[in-house]
Image: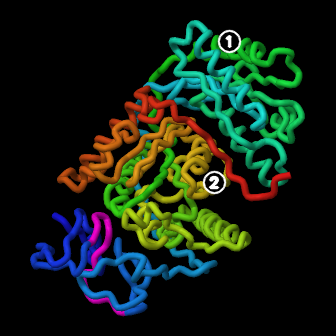
Amino acid sequence: MTLLQINERDNVAVALADLKRGRPIEFAGGVVTPLEDIPAGHKMALKDIAPGEEVIKYGYPIGRARVRIEAGRWVHTHNLETGLGAIEQYEYRPAPARLGIRDSGRTFPGYRRESGRVGVRNEIWIIPTVGCVNRIAEVIAEQARRELKGLDNIDGIYALTHPYGCSQVGEDQLATQKILAGLVNHPNAAAVLVVGLGCENNNVDAFKEVLGDYDGDRVKFMVAQEMEDEIAAGLDLVGRLASYARRFKRTPCPVSELVVGLKCGGSDGFSGITANPLVGAFSDMLVSHGGSTILTEVPEMFGAETLLMERAKDREVFEKIVKLINDFKEYYISHGQPVYENPSPGNRQGGITTLEEKSLGCTQKGGSSMVVDVLDYGERIGKKGLNLLRAPGNDLVASTALAASGCQLILFTTGRGTPLGTCVPTIKIATNSPLYRKKRHWIDFDAGRLLEGKSLPELAAELWDYVMEVASGRPTASEKMGFREIAIFKSGVTL
């Protein structure tokens, strides 16, 4: 098969391999002939499309024809444009696909914390309150990994550096504090050292006000300006934290305790056909077992938001989704930027033309579960099931936001490839098999096999087993490479 019509309503099909001009293709019981070369992952018109007529993919409009498009023509940026407006009005029309949800009793070996939450790693994190002490945190982590004894039950000691914590005011400073607080409280961290400078806006005392209650055995603080030798002092504190962290052992924990982030980056024309539906199937499986998933990248919901609104648990959640979407549009407008700047150059090269097309593929990661809640940026998950999270599409910012909201691991689909890894295990899922084979040191799982005869239920079951292995301690590709960055969203002034 070289050509795929995803939905019977579609007036375009996706090329599964490079198509050559004038070379006939058997399709739908007949023959179609491309009128020009069309790259794999890109779209070909199945019938004549008039100027201004909607182009349909996934059964929904992905934009309007700029000019007349003949059957057999390549459909892309030269002849297709977005049909989206700016701020939209939405009507509450609930039609949630309600899955049967039960705590199945299935378990995995995780770390039960004294707070009651469950981690999938037993790590020590060193978290700076301000970028000025980033290198201090890194040196402490590096020396601790070399010098501390008895780390056999500790999965690693890592510094989570960032550029903020000072010269920020208002919402920006609070956002930094909320994200860092979410990381300090994360169950994958058995113990945490918070390192401050002393004169920053987000000084240790100010940060404690946002952090709230904490366990003094699990979380230690150090102010570098108050230490004669901050490296030695930090190593002493990490040694004490290591003694605490060694107490934890893997024990059977219900899969209903898992919270999995859903993310994509470097999408291509296959993202909405293979990896994203596969992740959606996994999401539905986890939710059906009483677990939770979190979908973010709000700008990549534009054009498909009504599909999520229809699945809102109730009117309150519907109104939260409306606010989530329109607030992000207002953010773009307030900065004088076009609301529909997406897709990125890499997306376009991979076959995605409009934001509607990208969003209809991206939102498939949320499966068919009802949406139970909408989380603010930096807010921790509180309701089991599928949640939406306020965060941008930027890969590292969104991944960090997912971690801070409580995700113990992240499923990250990609059609272009990325080495990215954040502070929690990040499972990279290739949309196509050539990418998986080329970048095995980046990619963990091959969803391209859906184009080679594997069924969705069969591959979803395989992905489920793989995720459970990672939750049980199997390192991801990015963990093996030591890639674990964080990034914080910034929208205001810098002093």
Residue of label 1: 239
Badge 2 marks a residue whose secondary structure is strand
Based on the displayed image, in which of its 4 quarters is residue 438 positioned?
top left
Task: Give the quarter of the figure containing the N terminus.
Answer: bottom left
Q: Which kind of residue does numbered mark 1 sit on?
A: Gly
Up-down: is 137 above or below 85?
above
Residue placed at 52% from the left, 69% from the top?
Answer: 305
Is 458 in the magenta?
Answer: no
What stretch of residues is rendered in magenta? 38-50
Residue at mark 2? 375
Look at 54% across and 70% down and name the residue there. Answer: 302
Secondary structure of the magenta portion, mostly? Answer: loop
Kindly give the residue lying farthest to the top in the view shown.
149
The percent coordinates of residue 477 (x first, y second) are: 41, 35
> How many residues crowd mark 2 within 10 Å: few (<14), some (14–19), many (20+)?
many
Nearest the viewer among 306 and 63 is 63
User: Where residue 236 sits in the image (x, y, percent)?
Assistant: 73, 12
Q: Is residue 43 magenta?
A: yes
Residue 238 vs residue 281, the one in the foreground: 238
